[in-house]
Structures are given as structure tokens and as C-alpha cells.
Image: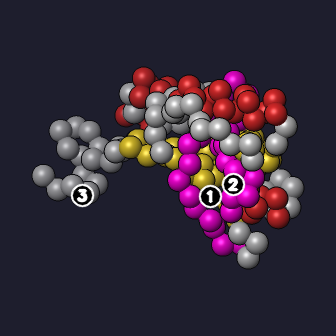
Amino acid sequence: MPRHSGKAVMGKSAVTSQSNTPPAAADTFWTERRICFLSTPRPDGTPHLVPVGVTYDPETRIARVISSAGSKKVRNLRAATPGTVVAVSQAEGRLWCTLEGTATVKDDPEAVADAERRYAERYKTPRPNPQRVVIEITVTRAMGTAKPPGW
């Protein structure tokens, strides 16, 4: 059977679409442990893409990434103009999702502790880091075959 012919196979399209994603898979896609990728703009405008852990709150539409204050991704965001758009993505098999939005770096203890708690729920308890900050992304767009609930 051809892999990417685009022809109908047994009455179904050979291309996976949003409607073919099982609802349970889409609902848990941003809660199960997965490596994600964050893209931030370098000062010269080129993308800086790095693997990260991401948590997403569907009620507030905020994605969070914890990081060290001196990391390149944080330095990129601090050098960027306010309202800079970033993207976080994850994929597994045919399921994928990209969340885009504006990023803010926060270093206040309450925001960092909240982000660490959320990270521990999805991944594991992060190691102690007195230089930790949180990148909060106010999500304005979701794309993919496994968008979070509400999109």
C-alpha cells in the first residue's frame, strides 16, 4: 500500500486530519510526559530552537517553561521587544501541536514556584536552582492534530 499517495484507502483518506484524532489523545497530549521544543528569536532575527519541558493551562491559555536566568532562550527574550511571539511544539507519531503566543520572563518567587509545581506534575520535581525563572507564554494560536481542549 502506498504510504503517501493521497488516495482514499478503504473509504478513508490516507492523510490524517484533525477529525481523525481520538478525543482522549488530544485531551491528554499536553499533560503526558513529552519533550517539547521552544523557538525564540535571536537578536539577529534567526530562530533559536531548544528542547524544553512545557506545561499548559487550558483555562488561562498560558504555557510555561522553567529555565535558568542566564540561558540563551531567556537572554533572547529579555533582549526582544515586548510582545515578542514565540512557539512551543511537541509531536509523537501522527499527533503534533504547536502553541504560539507572546512570552514574558518572570522571576518573582510566586510565579516560579507555581511553574515548578506544574512542571513536577507533568515531568518530575525539578532540581533546585536559585537562578530559576519562568517563561510564561500567553497562547494566541494552536495548530496541529492534537490541539488542547478549547481550541
The structure residue drawn at horizontal position 66% and vertical position 32%, both measured from the top left corner, is: 116
In this view of the protein, which residue sits in the foreground, 111 or 144? 111
* Side (left or right) of 112 relative to 151: right
User: What is the secondary structure assignment of the residue under circle 1?
Assistant: strand
Crowdedness of circle 3 by 10 Å Cα count: few (<14), some, many (20+)? few
Callout 3: SS: loop
Residue 48 is one of the magenta-drawn residues = yes
Q: Amino acid at mark 1?
A: Ser
State which tag comes first along the sequence, 3 or 2. Answer: 3
Part of the protein shown in magenta: 45-73
Residue that numbered label 3 is attached to: 5
Task: Give the answer, above or below, for where 37 lies relative to 24.
Answer: below
Residue 86: numbered disc: 2
> Do the numbered discs 3 and 2 sit on residues whose CB atoms are within 8 Å?
no
Marking on residue 39: 1
Number of other residues with Cα within 10 Å of mark 2, as a class: few under 14, some 14 to 19, many 20 or more: some
90 sits left or right of 5 in the view: right
